[in-house]
Amino acid sequence: MSINIPRGTQDILPGTVEKWQHIEKIATEICRNYQYKEIRTPIFEHTELFQRGVGDTTDIVQKEMYTFTDRGDRSLTLRPEGTAAVVRSFVENKMFGDPNQPVKLYYNGPMFRYERPQSGRYRQFVQFGVEAIGSEDPAIDAEVMALVMDIYKTAGLQKVELVLNSLGDKDSRVAYRNALIEHFQPRIGEFCEDCQSRLEKNPMRILDCKKDREHELMKSAPSILDYLNEYSRTYFEKVQSYLTALGIDFTIDPTLVRGLDYYNHTAFEVMSRADGFGAITTLCGGGRYNGLVSQMGGPDVPGIGFAFSMERFLAAMEAEGIAWEDDNRLDCYVVSLGEEAKDYTVKLVHDLRTAGMKAERDYQNRKMKAQFKAADRLQARFVAILGEDELKENKINIKDMETGEQQEIALDQFVETLRKKMEEK
Ligand code: HAM
């Protein structure tokens, strides 16, 4: 009996991997321009990190974590997201002492959530994210959003929309929380069980409920924007004015609350508006988390970041019909005829490769015609032909597959000649 891949995971095969590499290249280069440096944290962490960081009342912690006990009886969890771990590392490595503040980091790696798999939703998915920790300047909020929009635009995506909200500071949240409780309490019995338990613990999450989305109280719910205090309102206005100055379009959605507990002030998502993208349209989510570092045992340092999944990025590119050339064409296929010549090509192909060219030969004992076919499949620019006679005379034939031109040259000139020809291409 064969063993299949686990539900909600996928193999990224050659042919598709190149698309991932293409996006990763764009994203990492843009991160460099914005001066974000890569950080790599473990795939698993102490379970408590996510309980405390992401929040006990969130779906992620309550329903979606891959938690296990190791042989030392420790409770560990496969990371469901990157922010909590980056903040842990920031505190543990005392990055707050770095003279370069804010500390600007990016990461790229697999995350794990036990969710119901569907198009765009996996149990293992890859997040690319950034975190800027150590500044409460609205300019950094704008920078982080500019960065992600820059990545999408550079990849060619046009139908993407930045949606923005402010969740205010602690005081604004308390006022808003009370207003929400007052609004929902009298009719909370009409809502789902999750919403009922959220009423006291985290009423803002009710606004995010998929089941009760159409309930009339949802539409008439008070708006967070009416509860922002002076500081929060001014902060939000400043973020918007910076975005406008950068020429970045955005829409304000006061119902955008985000599913993780650590957010305050700026919260944002990037949505795909491409036709046929599918039911889940969120490409990227992020926001500010000013209390998280101190909650993790560090100093009271603010932070902001985002993460997008590579899977949804690729789906958006597909929905918008964005294609690009992956130039992995072979430079030279070395065809051989006869046992001795075959042996000789082992070294010949190696020499081409170490000289920086993409080279290949036959390993299947194929006849000459089949070797030519293989060269065609690999779209070889040149084919070199080494037969017994050529070998005796220390010569080799080179055929330019685009022009059909053939040339016989001395074997010891082969690598150098081919390199020059490649430079001319
Ligand atoms: P999040 O909204 O939970 O935020 O996830 C961010 C992004 O990860 C989503 O917008 C989506 O693209 C992708 N994603 C989430 N779950 C899945 C899934 N099951 N399958 C495929 N893609 C998925 C966070 O994780 C925060 N840590 C973001 C952040 C960074 N906030 C501040 N800094």
Image (spheres, rainbow, N blue to C red):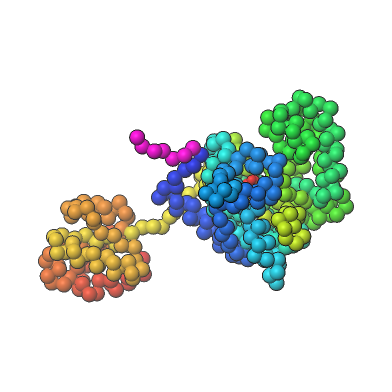
Residue 20 in view, yes or no: yes
**Residue 286 in sight in this render:** no
- Where residue 238 appears, x then y in whole percent? 80, 56
The location of residue 230, given as percent across then percent down, is: 88, 52
* Residue 2 within the segment the image draws in magenta: yes
Residue 321 versus residue 21 in the image, above or below: above
Please report the bounds of the magenta region as a residue range.
1-7
Quadrant where the image shows the N terminus: top left
- Residue at (65, 49) in percent of width and height: 48
Specify whether 125 is left or right of 219. Answer: left
Query: Hey, which quadrant is residue 63 in on the image?
Result: top right
Marker count (numbered): 0
Query: Dividing the picture into quarters, in which one does residue 275 lie?
Result: top right
- Residue 142 in percent (x, y) is at 72, 57
- Residue at the far right: name it: 230
**Residue 256 lies within the magenta run:** no
Residue at (81%, 31%) from the top-left corner?
A: 184
> Quadrant of the rendered structure where residue 406 is?
bottom left
x then y, percent, for residue 424: 35, 69
